[in-house]
Image: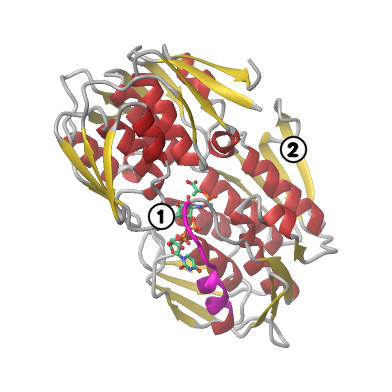
Amino acid sequence: MDKLRIRGGNPLKGQITVSGAKNAALPLQAACLLTDEKLTLTNLPLLADITTMNRLLAQHGVEVHINGRDAFGSSGRSVELYANDIFNTTAPYDLVRKMRASVLVLGPLVARFGQAKVSLPGGCAIGTRPVDLHIKGLQAMGAVIEIEGGYILARAPEGGLVGAEFVFPQVSVGATENLMMAATLAKGETVLVNAAREPEIGDLARCLIAMGAEIEGIGSDRLVIKGKERLHGATYAVLPDRIEAGTFAMAAAITGGELELLGARMGDLKAVAKTLAGANVKMTETPGGIMVSATAGELIGVDVMTEPFPGFPTDLQAQMMALMCVARGASMITETIFENRFMHVPELSRMGANITVHGSSALVRGVPRLTGAPVMATDLRASVSLVLAGLAAQGETTVSRIYHLDRGYERVEAKLAACGADMERVKEED
Ligand SMILES: CC(=O)N[C@H]1[C@@H](OP(=O)(O)OP(=O)(O)OC[C@H]2O[C@@H](n3ccc(=O)[nH]c3=O)[C@H](O)[C@@H]2O)O[C@H](CO)[C@@H](O)[C@@H]1O
Ligand SMILES: C=C(OP(=O)(O)O)C(=O)O
């Protein structure tokens, strides 16, 4: 098993190219199941999760052609997905438990093939994460759903799914994606109310439109989808990863550095830019992306509350907490999306952070400096928050279990080292 060794203290300086977004790519990959023609996705990030989704699709019968192979051997910058010979509509536990986004095959499979058997993903380190809204939404479209042996068994009515109005009692990114995909092949009109507005939803909608779908309301919380008999092939480029960009913005900030994030889009990061401005970190648009500068003096503590888009993203909460650990003053960080997303707190505390958790809020009192330590985390964003802390800490930090990081960050050590970070990937036994 690999780990990252980081010697902190170097201000980051330079440019980092932002990769394609994991959370956009995964639903786009699942969308290939909606057509028997070729879906080509470009600007894919080289990540373990993308490979897992390709494996899941392949076992359904999707032909997966990968271009631009990388060191993983099974992942590449672009992929051609042909779902013209689907022989299996079951998504097995072994793959779904590895990656919750596997549940995104449910909507497309039921919509196109009238049936699906998808393992329930179960809880994960950050929360219980039920999929009841995915199920209720499909039921509203006429699907009959049973839970048996840990699997969701879904069957469309004779003649296929039927368009419906579904009001989300709670904003859900994944359920919005699943239902939007299902609705593209349902009979009649589907209206999704209180839908998620994350940029990744817009990306999926634009790809579906390129495949022949009719969708209105992109960027709003009301999506209207007119079902079609069939969709066709398309070529689509995955949008840049706003969470990777936000993470690197905080890396620049925590080291008192200056980074240009090539490809990053300010429109996707407004709440982050506003929060960082309060912390004395400047984010400005450049012709190529966003410049982040933290050279103007000390960091200042700011309060943060995670919210669905356009609010501050939960996927940047851990990184923001690492930053606040070394800011002047105190910061109250409130997590409203997931009930257990503070697993980085004990590890940051081992590095000298002063954090007290009260329910869904963490009070972070800034300290003059963190100190390096061996640390590990049980989820993706918690792991990267420890990398950020390590970049700022005095001495050496080793971050273990970095398979979590590899789910969502492409060559993180190479990208940061190219901007002056003293860090390397080493084998666990080193
Ligand atoms: C692959 C992907 O895109 N993952 C992102 C997606 O996850 P994901 O799509 O799983 O997250 P959701 O938006 O669905 O979850 C939001 C909240 O709704 C709850 N919920 C969700 C569905 C449901 O049927 N019932 C229910 O109660 C969840 O437990 C959670 O508390 O959005 C999250 C919120 O921005 C991000 O942190 C994840 O990185
Ligand atoms: C929670 C995340 O991903 P997933 O939904 O795939 O677990 C994430 O990207 O931070």
419 or 212: nearer the viewer: 419
Q: What is the three-letter code of the residue carrying label 1? A: Glu
- Disc nearer the start of the sequence (1/2): 2
Is the residue 186 above or below the residue 278 in the image?
below
The numbered mark at residue 66 is: 2
Whether residue 288 is visible here, answered yes or no, is no
Q: Is residue 63 left or right of residue 139?
A: right
Q: Image quadrant of residue 385?
A: top left
Q: Which residue is mark 1?
A: 198
Quarter of the image that includes the C terminus: top right
Instruction: Name the residue furthest bottom.
Output: 158
Location of residue 70 in the rendering, given as x and y in whole percent from the top left corner: 70, 27
Quarter of the image that includes the N terminus: top right
Q: Residue at x 68, y 64 (%)?
A: 34
Label 1 sits on a secondary structure element that is loop
Q: Is mark 1 within 8 Å of ligand 1?
A: yes
Whether residue 115 is visible here, answered yes or no, is yes
Location of residue 67 in the rendering, given as x and y in whole percent from the top left corner: 73, 34
- Determine if the magenta segment contains residue 283: no
Is the residue 344 above or below the residue 103 in the image?
above
